């Protein structure tokens, strides 16, 4: 028996060694790693040099941790922000989770985390919970996203989709089982669904647009908070459909095809691109992304510095990760709100009703609800 | 070898010592050990009671009936016009994955064990056995990725009908995970068969194959069956592999090419913070867990009964 131990022990020792090594590399910053930096893309779309390429001065004095959790759609931006932040501040340990917008807020309202990534504005319930727990927060829009409807690249028949067709496909009472049910010229094959879980802001946003207040989304779909699971699902099934933030499509253009969505006003099919998302013609699926900052965490120097950095770099980070930068006036307003520690949300009225419309109209001081 | 007893104070009778210290120490050790074992029992009791208490809260909800839960085939707690809690949609996923795993692992594990115990040269055995134990030491999350990135693409070569997430790939990975469990438990049972039985059979002119199949395996049958039952309960409870490779669409199917969700897969999705902790869907996790607990307990207990009741005792 004793003889058998030797190789097993050796192997165990090797595994331990490797784990420790791996831990040194990746355990420092993030729970999950994804390749999000796309330098060539950034160079093409930005065309201007920013601080990221300038020589960085390293500050090792700033230490401490930053807890970030929430939307998997916002995750690439926060992840890119923290990755480049720790190059300047190697002593700081940001952890970026992705448990969904709802999951992030669940931890945020108890004061457990510093920053909540959100792909939709805070809801009235979450706002009330914050108030009840004495958690103040600063609302910071950081980028535009175009919620992207994707299909398998081998699906060549689905050239575009209207909002009505999306209703047929995704609503519980849509009555559609196969692609042929949507359009008689399409194949008689069952539609397979890969969609974000009900806790994600992406799902909430999609539901609000497609189902409205009263409708309900159909059951029998594969759901996951992990967008890469959805990417693989759609990439592996010829008759699948799915949706998520545009960044996950941008990273997987070889595996997926985005379906142009017919703009309800112009009647033209529109692809989610930088231009169409920015000018709002990719309607109704253009939306802002947010980070919510616990106002108590502003007192932590590492968090304060991180948010400064995040807001400075937000336009560049948004482009790098496949999203679209907001107008400069919005960032200006966000920076001022951060400096003045303006707490509260702009997307809820005093009566706790949801406010809709373009960011530029909603994100103004008059709309603030505390 | 002469034992020098003169150093013992008890033997020499020179230095008597009060035994009170020893008694106190013994009592303390006893309390410590007893406390430790009580702790594990208490933990078990705590877990089981939480499980059933929360499951009870789930069944108290007006939307849920126990009968509907046990017999229903639609599982839609999150979406859809009407929330439905029919656990068979999840049970069928667990069944199909476990079935594939066992079809793979039981024969292979049994054959491996017979080879190791009856055929293998000690030197071969010395290499094979640790290799199998290494297989048992691989974290199941690795098997999950293996299923998703290796087994599934291979399956797709054979047939186009396989989804990216499918029950077959997950089942095969669970099967690989179970092989070392089956083979090492079965091997223990086979090696416990007295050598005299083998010698007797050889003396009558039996071949090695005949000795293995007609003498050793029947003699160790109770051990083999209990090993099988343990492996089944391991497969039923396996979580990480199915969460990664089997998909997340609960529906009643026995088609191994489709994606499916197992009971454990559902619990992972709920526990990862998909829904509010007060939501009915979250509570449903406990009801599913309680059912899973009952299933694995029945399997384990029947394994023990088989082993103790049908064991052939050789003196």
Image (cartoon, coloured by chain):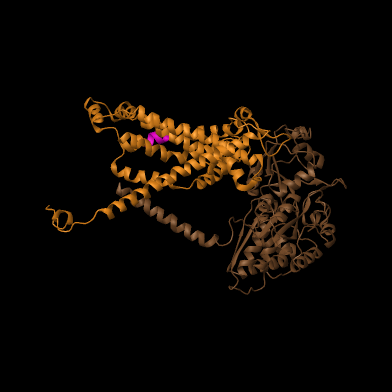
Chain colours: A brown, B orange
| Residue A160 visible in the shown view | no
Residue B56 lies left or right of residue A355; in this view the side is left
List x then y, in percent, for residue B222. 36, 29
Residue farthest to the left? Answer: B2
Percent across and percent down for residue B312 are 31, 28
- Judging depth in this view, the residue of A250 and A306 nearest the camera is A306
Picture quarter containing residue A242?
top right
Residue A119 in picture, x, y percent from top left = 72, 53
Magenta span: chief secondary structure = helix
Which residues, given as a range, are shown in magenta? B108-112
At x 76% / y 50%, what residue is drawn?
A124
Q: Is A217 left or right of A236, judged from the image as shown? A: right
Q: Is residue A289 magenta?
A: no
Q: Quadrant of residue B8?
A: bottom left
Q: Which residue is located at x 58 percent, y 73 percent?
A: A60
Instruction: Give coordinates of residue A349: x percent, y percent.
Output: 82, 54
């Amino acid at each position: 028996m004793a003889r058998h131990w030797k190789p097993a022990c050796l192997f165990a020792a090797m595994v331990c060694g490797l784990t420790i090594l791996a831990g040194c590399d990746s355990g420092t910053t993030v729970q999950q790693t994804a390749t999000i930096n796309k330098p060539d893309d950034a160079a093409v779309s930005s065309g201007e040099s920013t601080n990221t390429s300038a020589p960085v001065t390293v500050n090792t004095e700033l230490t401490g941790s930053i807890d970030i959790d929430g939307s998997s759609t916002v995750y690439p931006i926060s992840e890119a922000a923290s990755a480049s932040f720790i190059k300047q501040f190697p002593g700081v340990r940001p952890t970026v989770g992705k448990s969904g917008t709802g999951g992030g807020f669940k931890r945020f309202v108890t004061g457990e985390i510093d920053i909540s990534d959100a792909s939709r504005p805070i809801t009235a319930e979450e706002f009330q919970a914050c108030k009840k727990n004495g958690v103040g927060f600063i609302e910071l829009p950081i980028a535009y996203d175009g919620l992207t409807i994707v299909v398998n690249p081998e699906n060549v028949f689905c050239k575009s989709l209207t909002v009505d067709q999306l209703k047929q496909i995704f609503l519980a009472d849509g009555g559609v089982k196969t692609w042929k049910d949507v359009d008689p010229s399409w194949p008689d094959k069952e539609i397979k669904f890969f969609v974000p879980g009900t806790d994600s802001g992406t799902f909430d946003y999609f539901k609000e647009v497609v189902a409205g207040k009263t409708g309900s989304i159909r059951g029998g779909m594969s759901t996951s908070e992990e967008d890469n699971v959805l990417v693989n699902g759609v990439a592996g099934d010829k008759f699948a459909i799915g949706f998520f933030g545009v960044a996950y499509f941008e990273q997987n253009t070889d595996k997926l095809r985005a379906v142009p969505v017919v703009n309800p006003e112009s009647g033209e099919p529109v692809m989610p691109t930088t231009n169409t998302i920015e000018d709002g013609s990719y309607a109704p699926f253009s939306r802002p992304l947010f980070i919510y900052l616990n106002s108590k965490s502003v007192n932590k120097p590492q968090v304060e510095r991180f948010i400064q950095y995040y807001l400075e770099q937000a336009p560049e980070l948004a482009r790098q990760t496949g999203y679209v930068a907001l107008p400069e006036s919005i960032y200006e307003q966000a920076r001022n709100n951060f400096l003045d520690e303006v707490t509260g949300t702009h997307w809820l009225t005093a009566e706790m009703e949801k406010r809709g419309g373009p960011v530029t109209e909603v994100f103004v001081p008059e709309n603030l609800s505390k | 070898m002469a034992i020098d007893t003169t150093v013992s104070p008890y033997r020499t009778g020179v230095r008597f010592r009060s035994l009170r210290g020893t008694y106190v120490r013994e009592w303390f050790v006893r309390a410590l050990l007893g406390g430790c074992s009580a702790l594990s029992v208490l933990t078990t009791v705590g877990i089981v009671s939480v499980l059933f208490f929360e499951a009870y809260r789930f069944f108290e909800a007006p939307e849920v009936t126990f009968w509907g839960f046990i017999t229903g085939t639609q599982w839609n707690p999150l979406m859809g016009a009407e929330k439905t809690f029919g656990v068979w949609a999840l049970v069928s996923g667990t069944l199909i994955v476990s079935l594939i795993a066992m079809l793979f692992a039981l024969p292979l594990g049994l054959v491996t064990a017979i080879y190791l115990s009856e055929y293998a040269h000690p030197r071969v055995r010395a290499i094979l056995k640790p290799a199998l134990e290494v297989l048992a030491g691989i974290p199941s999350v690795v098997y999950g990725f293996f299923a998703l990135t290796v087994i599934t693409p291979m399956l797709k070569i054979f047939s186009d009908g396989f989804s990216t997430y499918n029950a077959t790939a997950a089942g095969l990975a669970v099967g690989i995970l179970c092989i070392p469990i089956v083979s090492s438990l079965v091997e223990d049972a086979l090696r416990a068969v007295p050598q005299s039985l083998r010698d007797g059979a050889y003396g009558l002119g039996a071949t090695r194959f005949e000795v293995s199949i007609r003498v050793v395996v029947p003699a160790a049958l109770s051990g083999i069956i209990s090993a099988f039952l343990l492996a089944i309960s391991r497969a039923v409870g396996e979580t990480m592999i199915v969460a990664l490779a089997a998909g997340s669409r609960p529906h009643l199917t026995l088609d191994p090419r489709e994606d499916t969700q197992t009971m454990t897969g559902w619990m992972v999705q709920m526990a990862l913070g998909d829904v509010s902790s007060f939501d009915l869907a979250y509570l449903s996790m406990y009801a599913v867990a309680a059912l899973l607990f009952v299933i694995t307990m029945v399997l384990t207990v029947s394994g023990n009964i088989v082993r103790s009741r049908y064991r052939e005792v050789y003196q």
